[in-house]
Amino acid sequence: MKLLIIEDEQSLRENITTYFNEDGNVYENCGDLCSAMDKLALYDYDCILLDIGLPDGEDFTILNYLKAKMKSESVIIISARNSLDDKLKGLNIGADDYLTKPFHLAELKARVVAVFRRKTGSNKGILVFNEIAIDLQGRTAAVNDIPIILTRKEYEMLLYFIANKGKVISKAALAEHLWGDEMDMHSHFDFIYTHIKNLRKKIMEADGKDYLQSVYGIGYKFLAA
Amino acid sequence: MKLAAHYNRTNILITVTLLIIGAVIYFLAINYIARSQLDNDLSEEVAEVIDYVSANHKLPKQVDFDEDQTVFIETNQKQIQPRFFDTVYVNPKEKEKKPGRAIESIIQLNGSYYKVIITVSRESTEYLLQFVGIITLGLMVGLLLTLFLANRYFLSGLWKPFYALLHQIKEFNISEKNNFKLTGERVDEFVELSAAIDDMSKRVSNDYQNLKHLTDNASHEMLTPLAVITAKLDILIQHERLPAEIYEQIEDIYSATSKLSRMNQTLLLLTKIENNLIIGNEPIDLDILLTDKIKQFQELILAKQISVTENLRKKEVLVSKYLVDILLNNLISNAIWHNNDYGDLIITLDDEELLFQNTGSPVALNREHVFERFKKGNKSEGTGLGLTLVENICKFCGWEISYNFKENLHSFKIVF
């Protein structure tokens, strides 16, 4: 996957790169509009992470440019602005997703993977990870070809974990993904444990591997292999 | 008391005092003049009597002195100072007693001395005084009435621009465009006043706008550093060889960061609501939305073993879905977080109102401060902005929210 990260905050840019740095992904970063335009003119990317609100330029210049050039890059907007209007405008001009700062890297990764998956449409909508197969359209999962019945939250969790396989995911990130920021969890994450426990049990009952590990009470990790 | 009334009171008080003093002086003066006139006449009468006596060597008959009454009394006194005095005058025809004025003097006739007393009626003088008095009183009343009416109509007309301005000031809203204008005003003071107020309001609004932009920008600018902190933490926890207590610290940083970011979002939203920047009303079935929300909070409700009672009747409202979502999220999550384990939550919805009642702390919240920013309970882990947001959303939708504590139930009532 070839990614272009357009973000003027250098440390954030670096952290995103560090977190995504695996699976033979190719990254390019730039911190301003000019160099971003140069890169876009020269190369094609699979996905662009775009911070609207760059110091030099109109917010939607890049999106408009991509649209004008009929380029096929998926775009995920990263913005400090949480206004509905901005969100709708961005999505209307052709962005694929919109993420408000601050966000967890795991969330960003999950969104990028989802966008990428939608774009490539690989394998007829079936996501395969070792013995686990997920039917993205039917929203069902099977382990060793044995269907397992997951609740909505468990299903979402499984997708989220697979997108972030091999990474430690904090409970805060997980809670935010599952319940959104609408529901204020007040940092009580006991509910997560129940869901994790159930998901783990269901996978293992179908003779799946024990992928889910608890990490020092701070979060969970889905083993990459 | 109004300024005009103050002015009227002073005005009338001074006028009346002056008029009374004037009337007294007037009365005394007229009285004095009339009396001097009478005394003059009496002196002339006495002179006539003396002339008569020295010419005719006898006392004049009563009839010679038309209305006046003259009495002669023989006396031993040879000399007395002529003296004027008030007495009673009896009208010879009507036998009526009237106030009179008399003079007393001595005349000499054929070697004997007579005391002569001439009495005249004072009736005409009294009549004159009365007449003058009535005219004066009439004038006084007329003057007062005129003053009163003038004050009432002319002065209040004069103050009209003042009240117009006052009304505009009362309507002043800092977040809206305000114009202090008096049309066709000719009184310099008021023109100046309205210009000064207009100037002031413009400056205030301007400062307010600047401050708002500052807050807005600051809140936005803060989100990027928050994103950096979150990202750094996400990277940090990938190092699985850190000591366990470091993870505890990291968890606390996570929670503080998320609180900060929520606070920030809420503040931004509050600003937006206060500036009417939320658009897009749509019909919403509140009962259906409430049922959905309760489902959404099911895990929390189960975790605290709260029993939820729903008395929902169909109710459609036309508001922003976005805001109602936030409103209900806040109210439900409040009612759960501040509830006891095994507590109750009763949600009642009908055509007029929406009522959230929940068990919780046995002490009532302070009704005056409950919706204020950053006023929160000791145990609350929230941002302290939830209820402020709730109140502002209600205000924005034109609803009224109130808090009550009765029979161990905290209740928040929204009246549509």
Image (cartoon, coloured by chain):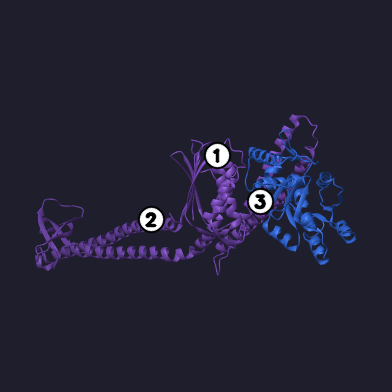
Residue under disc 1 on the same chain as residue under disc 3: yes
**At 46% from the left edge and 38% from the top edge, which residue is drawn?**
B408
Instruction: Give the labeled residue for mark 2.
Output: B13
Q: Where does residue B15 sit, x and y in percent of width and height?
A: 38, 58
Q: Chain of mark 2?
A: B
Among numbered discs 3 and 2, the one appearing first in the sequence: 2
Query: Separation of disc 3 and disc 2 at Cα?
Result: 60 Å
Q: What amino acid does circle 1 point to?
A: His
Residue A96, position as x, y percentages in the image: 75, 58
Q: Nearer the viewer, mark 2 or mark 1?
A: 1
Q: Nearer the viewer, residue B209 or B307?
A: B307
Q: Colour of chain B?
A: purple
On the rendered image, what quadrant is the N terminus of chain B found in?
bottom left
- Residue A120 visible in the picture: yes
Closest to the camera, between mark 3 and mark 2, is: 3
Kindly identify which numbered label has been placed on residue B268.
3
What is the drawing colour of chain A?
A: blue
Q: In the rendered structure, find residue A67 and report the number of the disc placed on it.
A: none
Instruction: Residue at 70% x, 60% y: name it.
Output: A88
Residue B234 lies in quadrant = top right
Say which chain tag 3 marks.
B
Circle nearer the N terminus (2, 1):
2
Label 1 marks which chain's residue?
Answer: B
Q: CA distance from mark 2 to mark 1?
A: 66 Å
Measure the alpha-carbon separation of dots 1 and 3: 25 Å
**Contact flag, marks 2 and 1 (Cβ < 8 Å):** no
Image label count: 3
Residue B237, percent across and down? 77, 37
Q: Is residue A196 above or below residue A61?
A: above
